[in-house]
Image (cartoon, rainbow, N blue to C red):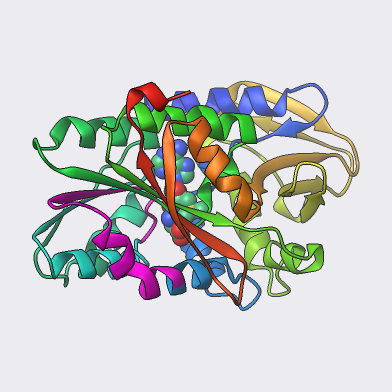
Amino acid sequence: MQALLDFAREVRDGLSKPGQRELPSIYLYDEIGTALFEAITLLPEYGLTRADERLLRRHAPAIIERLPPPVLVTELGSGCGLKTRWLLETLARREPVGYYPIDISPSALAKCERELASLGSVSIVGLEKSYLDGVREVASRRRPGQTLLVLFLGSTIGNFDRPAADVFLREIRRCLQPGDALLLGTDLEKPVAELLLAYDDPAGVTAAFNLNLLARINRELGGDFVLRNFAHEARYRKRERRVEMHLRSKRRQSVSIREAGFTCTLKADETIWTEACHKFRVEEIPGMAARTGFVCEAQWVDSEWPFAENLWIAAPPAATS
Ligand SMILES: C[S@@+](CC[C@H](N)C(=O)[O-])C[C@H]1O[C@@H](n2cnc3c(N)ncnc32)[C@H](O)[C@@H]1O
């Protein structure tokens, strides 16, 4: 019930913002959105997930050997956790493994638990929580002497504005002890045309993923969005180095959302901003680590689709800025 009230409030606040209207990207991931996101990861235009997986498959031994046993693994926004298999398998050859995937999507967690159930000596406990609540819970459950490995893959860090990413990473650091690790996946800058295709594929899967947010508001909050009156758009903002997903109103129209007690009128061509995907330079990552209380221990870059896997180690508190 509280979750629905929060959803209604955030939708009302986002749609009544002066200037650019917004909807929070966290609400893209209901059951349908989760399934559509999985389909996106298979699209030929969306090389990000395959690059992430190639790096994990190739470098899992080098990642794991840098972490002193025993290791406890948690993953922020695990989704269905397919790529994580490579790390868990490698670790399980060395020791019994505890793995806590954290995700707000129950269907993602259920799939993750199913997909990874076949891994021997890995015990999986899914946590249906937000990132920070989840990681705090895992930190409270760890046993003395365990190294905590936090995975934040898929460049989901790019969904935060850059200053908010620093704040978030500092919060994660606060949950860790010196010597714990964060494996951070970051999608790197690439030609704009390639990026725009990745977020606006010709088959329209990303468009369906984006439009499903309006459909979800209709289903759960009694909205009356007419989906045909909106178009998906991907835009690249050069200065911010990010792709933005928008929903463009094709005409002047009014929309009511019963549970939010809210009505608004959208002008023709006005957009609702739904997601940001910031892109990175490999050389800026060690600075991000240093600013947020970590040391960047190693980086691996994919040669087909520029993407970096970054292993950060939690620095002692004195080094935390
Ligand atoms: C972009 S997907 C990435 C999934 C997977 N890690 C990957 O790399 O393919 C983001 C995932 O994070 C989850 N998520 C988004 N915001 C979240 C939040 N604030 N707390 C917990 N999970 C969140 C979504 O449900 C989704 O499964």
Q: Quadrant of the N terminus?
A: top left
Instruction: Write down the quadrant of residue 218 in the picture.
Output: top right
Q: Vertically, is 243 above or below 14?
A: below
Does residue 208 lie above or below 160 as drawn? below
User: In which image quadrant can residue 224 be found?
Assistant: top right
Residue 186 can be seen, yes or no: yes
Using residue 314 as the reference point, say whether residue 298 is left or right of it. Answer: right
x then y, percent, for residue 145: 10, 39
**Would residue 72 be counted in the magenta stretch?**
yes
In the image, what residue occupies the spot 75% across and 31% down? Answer: 21
Residue in front for this viewpoint, 194 or 292: 292
Residue most extreme to the front: 318
Is 106 placed above or below 287 here? below
Q: Position of residue 72 (x, y in %)?
A: 18, 48
Quarter of the image for residue 256 reads: top right
Query: Position of 274 compared to 86: left or right?
Result: right
Out of 298 and 195, give the one closest to the viewer.
298
Taking the spot 30% from the left edge, 36% from the top edge, the residue there is 134
The residues colored magenta run 55-80
Q: Residue 89's x, y, as percent?
A: 21, 70
User: What residue do we see at 66% from left, 47% from top?
Assistant: 278
Position of 270 with respect to 319 (left or right) is: right
Q: Is residue 224 above or below residue 73?
A: above
- Seen from the viewer's position, the closer of residues 17 and 265 is 17
Q: Position of residue 143 (x, y in %)?
A: 9, 37
Q: Is residue 134 magenta?
A: no
Depth check: 262 or 37 in front? 37
Can residue 125 be seen by looking at this rendering? no
